[in-house]
Amino acid sequence: MAFPCVDHLEQRTQKFLQSFDGGPEPSYSNPVSGYSLYQHNEPFLLDHGGILPKFEIAYESWGELNADKSNVILLHTGLSASSHAKSHPANPAPGWWEKFIGPGLAIDTNRFHVICTNVIGGCYGSTGPSSIDPKDNKPYATRFPIVTIFDMVRAQFEMLNSMGIKKLHASVGASMGGMQSLAAALLFKDRVGKVVSISAAARSHPYSIALRFTQRQVLMADPNWNKGFYYDKVPPHSGMKLAREIATISYRSGPEWEQRFGRKRSQPSTTPSLCADFLIETYLDHQGERFCLQYDPNSLLYVSKAMDMFDLSASVSAQTALRRARNTQRLQEGKGSSAPENAAVPPPDEQAAACSTGATPAGSKSGNDTQDDPKAQLNDLKEGLNTIRDIPTLVLGIQSDILFPVWQQKEVADCLRETGNKNVTYYELDSMYGHDAFLLEIINVGSAVKGHLELKG
């Protein structure tokens, strides 16, 4: 029996081994041009104690900035997206939200100045694991400190400060971007006029955490991952391909695939094979192939972990504030490093402690008194969201979304309303495209976004 899927992986590995000059170069190592760079040259404290000595943010913009800089919309990205949300003369390729941004569209560039960034931790121009550590002029790899959604947002607002932008007209995002849009309002409530959160949540829940954990485990099991130190070697392309296939299953819906693929085989006249055979398998195989050299594997690990840790509950915010206060003092005393607090930077062969089996046993106490009490957890979340009770907010969910089910968006809307926010708009869309509907439902998603952004008051 032939195994073309296995042979193809081996062939790609051999191409890397034969010649790094002539072999398949990962596209994240040479990001698409056309973006601008914000450079932050001061130490930047992260939520879990890590310190970046400096960082850069890649960003792109559309529409004219008005005289008082009050028409700015900050557009936040999903996990693997770049700053290229819309085509422009410096980069005419279609962006990931191409049909949502422009004159008269959902985000009307005749009215608004739109800024989109690549998050820190990413690999499309912003500082992340593939960036050079100024200490030794080598890629950070897994020496890069753990980052949170809040760290990403704080970095974005440092950029806004440099631009003289005091307040956003709106903070807008979907998926991980929807987490960022809520985080921006919580951190900078006086600087955010409106919020749009699509297909997101106020806290990550077990199912989505499990999906992302599985992707990370598959990736780290690829021997070429080398505990994150692969930048001058063969990258973990097999692990990335499989991780993307797992992710794709959570991005779309069963009804769409029933209609689109059914039980059709790609070559029904041939003997079934153990490689991609059904059309749905060839689709997943294509998605994995397309992605495996487009995005830095370490960025996938770090950014997906940031999503897992996301929680707007008051107790979590209080713990973070205490930790940041302690580490701010440490930074001021000149003890900062890229490592977390109280942790030394281990050599490469001792990296990636996350792979060890030191997890807390199931059922043990974590110190969070609300952990086993759903009602207390919900009250904790309401208290956390109380900060943004005065900000008009659009929350939008997709009924077929299995990664961020609609009950999670309804939780956001309900909690905001119960804090006294009288300007909460909640929509559920009946789309068969699952989580990816925010990229595909131009009319339904676009109309809701446009109405909220242009509403007076």
Image: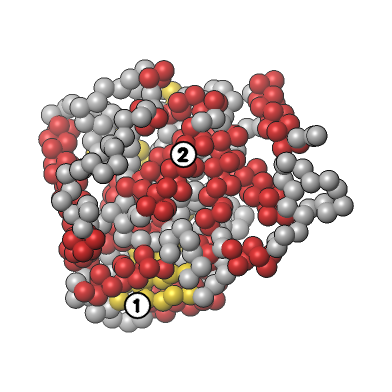
Question: Which residue occupies the foreground of this view, 269 or 160?
Answer: 269
Regarding mark 1 in the picture, which secondary structure is present there?
A: strand
Question: Three-letter amino acid code at disc 2?
Answer: Arg
Residue 115 lies left or right of residue 393; in this view the side is right
The residue wearing badge 1 is 425
Question: Which residue occupies the foreground of this view, 328 or 257?
Answer: 257
Q: Quadrant of residue 44?
A: top left
Residue 362 to residue 202: above or below: above
Q: Position of residue 340 (x, y in %)?
A: 26, 31
**Residue 290, visible in the rendered structure:** no
Q: Quadrant of the N terminus?
A: top right
Q: Nearer the viewer, mark 2 or mark 1?
A: 2
The residue wearing badge 2 is 216
Q: Position of residue 326 (x, y in %)?
A: 13, 37
**Residue 282, visible in the rendered structure:** yes
Question: Three-letter amino acid code at disc 1?
Answer: Thr
Question: Which residue occupies the foreground of this view, 347 or 337?
Answer: 347
The residue drawn where x is 40% and y is 30% is 355
The residue drawn where x is 72% and y is 60% is 263
The residue drawn where x is 72% and y is 37% is 5
Q: Quadrant of the C terminus?
A: bottom left
Residue 348 lies left or right of residue 434; in this view the side is left
The residue drawn where x is 30% and y is 42% is 362
Q: Are marks 2 and 1 in contact (CB under 8 Å)?
A: no
Q: Residue furthest front?
A: 363
Distance of label 2 from label 1 (alpha carbons): 35 Å
Q: Quadrant of residue 241?
A: top right
Q: Residue furthest bottom?
A: 456
Q: Position of residue 112 (x, y in %)?
A: 41, 69
